[in-house]
């Protein structure tokens, strides 16, 4: 189960992009994480259905997830609105 929390933390770190990858780099790194999560979701124990939901939701929003990394200074969320 601990691995599920590690994956979510890693996802957050990738999306925060403190290492300043370009949009393609963030997308590629995030895709690698999702692949790892899918292939090893049994390690998440009782949270494996949550991992399935996380992956499915991410796939649903995939086409719009990385635009904010293409434009410098573009906000990653609309929380400030």
Image (cartoon, grey):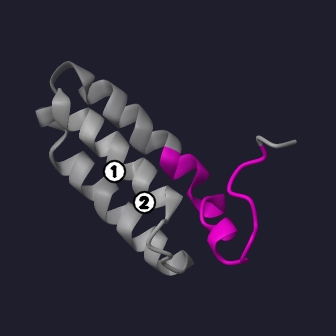
| 36 on left or right of 74 | left
Q: Which residues are magenta?
A: 58-78
Residue 41 placement (x, y as % from top left): 19, 39
Q: Is residue 60 above or below residue 70?
A: above
Name the element at disc 1.
helix
Q: Is residue 45 magenta?
A: no
Q: Quadrant of the C terminus?
A: top right
- Camera-side residue of 63 and 32: 32
Q: Mark on residue 69?
A: none
Dot 2, crowdedness within 10 Å: few (<14), some or many (≥20)? some
For mark 2, what is the residue? 14
| 77 on left or right of 36 | right
Residue sitting farthest toward the left:
43
What's the residue at 37%, 63% (across, down)?
A: 31
What's the residue at 61%, 59% (across, down)?
A: 65
Q: Is residue 60 magenta?
A: yes
Name the element at disc 2.
helix
Residue 78 placement (x, y as % from top left): 78, 46
Q: Is residue 55 above or below residue 23?
A: above
Residue sitting farthest toward the top:
46
Q: Mark 2 and mark 1 in contact (Cβ < 8 Å)?
A: yes
**Residue 29, quarter of picture:** bottom left
| 18 on left or right of 38 | right
Residue 47 placement (x, y as % from top left): 26, 24
Per the model, the C-alpha gap separating discs 1 and 2 is: 6 Å
For mark 1, what is the residue? 10
Residue sitting farthest toward the front:
18
Q: Quadrant of the N terminus?
A: top left
What's the residue at 15%, 45% (across, down)?
A: 40
């Amino acid at each position: 189960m601990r691995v599920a929390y590690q994956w979510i933390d890693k996802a957050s770190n990738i999306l925060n992009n403190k290492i300043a990858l370009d949009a393609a780099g963030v997308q590629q790194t995030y895709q690698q994480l999702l692949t790892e999560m899918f292939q090893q979701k049994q390690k998440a124990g009782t949270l494996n259905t949550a991992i399935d939901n996380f992956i499915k939701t991410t796939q649903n929003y995939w086409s719009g997830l990385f635009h904010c990394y293409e434009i410098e200074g573009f906000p990653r969320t609309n929380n400030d609105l």
